[in-house]
Image: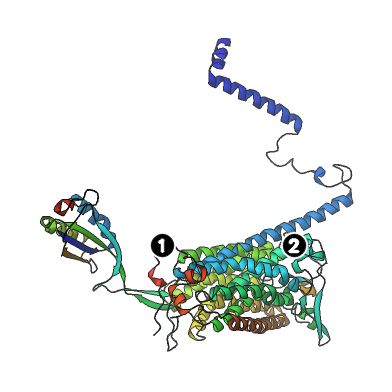
Amino acid sequence: MKEKMKGFLNKKSGAVIACMALVFLALSVVSLFAGGPDASGTATGTASDVSSAVAGKPTLDELANTVGHNKVAINFVWTLMAGFLVMFMQPGFAMVETGLTRAKNVAHTMGMNFLIYPLGMLGFYACGFALMFGGIGALGTMGGYAGLNHEFTINLFGKSFGLFGLNGFFLQGTSYDVAVFTLFLFQMVFMDTTATIPTGALAERWKFLSFCIYGIFVGTIIYPIFGNWVWGGGWLAMLGQNFKLGHGHVDFAGSSVVHLTGGVLALIGAWIVGPRIGKFNKDGSANPIPGHNIPMAVVGTFILAFGWFGFNAGSTLAGTDLRIGIVAVNTMLASATGAMAATLWMWLVRTKKPDPSMMCNGMLAGLVAITAPCAFVNSISACIIGLISGVLVVESVYFVEGKLKLDDPVGAISVHGVNGAFGCLALGLFADGSYGDGWNGVAGTVKGLFYGDASQFFAQCIGVLSNIVYVGIISFLVFKLIEVLFGHRPEPEAEIYGLDIPEMGVAGYSGIKLDRHSETPIAK
Amino acid sequence: MKKIEAIIRPAKLDLVCETLDKIGYPGMMITEIEGHGKQKGLVQQWRGKEYKVGLLPKTKIEVVVRDQDLDKTVKAIREAAFTGEMGDGKIFVSTIEDAIRIRTGEQGNIAV
């Protein structure tokens, strides 16, 4: 035996193995004394992790403090993670828009979708967030800090009408608070969702400079004002308290605040900027201008659907509000029925082919429409809302192009405008009273017309109408201003050649032969 | 020397190349083109609007051969590219004045 051991240790491999065994033994002995590794996880996290005067022996008060802190912490983590998901919708929009437009403009289309993120964010940081949330008061789910307490109001009909906030510019002073910062991030990515919607409707014929000017306005003023009215404690939210109209205009995650605003901006923009060269013939009939990359559009749509989980479920601003599961499922179901409805409508009724770009628009329409009611409806209603939105988006694409004679390359007006409005009205119909007790300061849960509260539907109508009027007017002014100062359209030669090199200085697909659909149709 | 320009279906390219290789002409020039003869285009649609794409993708093979190899090369290409459906393509023959191998400077039939 001894000879065998000596023979084993004399070999190089034997010596190495023996050394390793010794080291392992030594470490095991050490760790035994140091409290041992916890592979199952059951021993990690104990009373010693609760802050207490006496280590490992917290008092009831100390325990209560930690419980409260942890509850708020869960809400912070939830809100932030959801916000990160919504930020990821930016590449989703970029891919959908670029896929549905031509190869000769990709650097420009992508450029707009890229730059809108910082442009919108910085405008919102400097000014927009303060206008929108400066007067929101206590941040209930995130610790109750009430430093955002300055709302500008006017008195009408004996009631206080909140119009905009005045606290939080550049997140300085009393807004340098952890809850405020978390709220800012979450709300900023919502604003950037609105901001990027018109870039789709105006793709392929918008001067990059004019887009940039628009980008400054949308985050600083256009989006935040209406946002204040609904989410910042402004007058639309107060319609319930002030005039007994349901719970005021209710919009859980932004069918009106985000999508209808974006859709109206897209509508006014498309109207003022005009159609692409070659889109419409003299007799008013439209020419198809096929997009160059369906795979991009489909992947982009999935990215958006994924990010929407953050968009809708995150709008509880609380991981401890366990309605989040229902919110997420409602969102998912509406996206599915929206996609199915649009697909079947194209396949069986309209063109007899399941058009991929419309399939994608259908899913997005469902998501837009469920955004307002997602927390307040049951799953069947969510399915129905998605189903209706799928048909609505297809028909409105035909309407916008055929009757309004507006050029909307990606269907932004139909997806976000039409279905944003529908989503708000759907809340006023389908809200089933299972959630929302105390919403906007009104006791009781949120109910729609079908569940006994007609006034809620009325409040929704007022919300939708005021959005269309306000956004319509202010976007008209902004687009007209830009038209007068800078003009919107590039030179016709640049538009026909492709905007990449004239506007952006670089060909997006440098070195790759462009497909023939990059050509501009000859308008007859 | 003769130049053979063969417009064929893109799917037939591999077979034609193999055939040319077998009969002693491994070198050729390939261009991707669009075109059509009697074959009609395709109807596509984009978001509800129909449009016709009149041009179809084809492949053009150009190969320069010695005069004595012309007939057998044309025959080989035609057999390889044949399907019997409209859209099989066409073969054109033209006369080449001279050929020079860049590496060695050889001229004439040797260079082909």
Give residue A347's quadrant in the image: bottom left
Disc 2 marks a residue whose amino acid type is Phe
Indicate the amino acid at tag 1: Ile
Q: Is residue A263 left or right of residue A169?
A: left
* CA–CA distance in space, label 1 to label 2: 44 Å
* Residue shown at 15% from the left, 51% from the top: B110
Residue A385: where, in percent of width, then height? 60, 74
Q: Is residue A44 above or below residue A344?
A: above
In the image, is residue A465 above or below residue A297?
below
**Is residue B66 visible to us here?**
yes
Relative to residue A176, is residue B111 drawn left or right? left
Q: Which mark is residue B6?
A: none
Q: Quadrant of residue A476?
A: bottom right
Residue A198 pos. (x, y %): 58, 75
Q: Quadrant of the N terminus of chain A?
A: top right
Badge 2 marks a residue whose secondary structure is helix
Q: Nearer the viewer, mark 1 or mark 2?
A: 1
User: Residue drawn 75% across and 62% down?
Assistant: A181
Classify mark 2: residues with Cα within 10 Å, few (<14), some (14-19) or many (20+).
some
Q: Which residue is mark 1?
A: A512
Quarter in which the C terminus of chain A is drawn: bottom left
Relative vertical location of residue A521 with respect to residue B112 in this rendering, above or below: below
SS state under label 1: loop
Image coordinates of residue A255 in percent, x first then y, are: 64, 74
Check disc 2 and report the residue beneath it: A181
| Number of callouts | 2
Who comes first in sequence, dot 1 or dot 2?
2
Q: Chain of mark 1?
A: A
Q: What colouring method underlies this structural image?
A: rainbow
At horizontal 84% and vertical 86% (from top left) the residue drawn is: A158
Neighbourhood count class around disc 1 (C-alpha, 10 Å): few under 14, some 14–19, many 20 upward: few
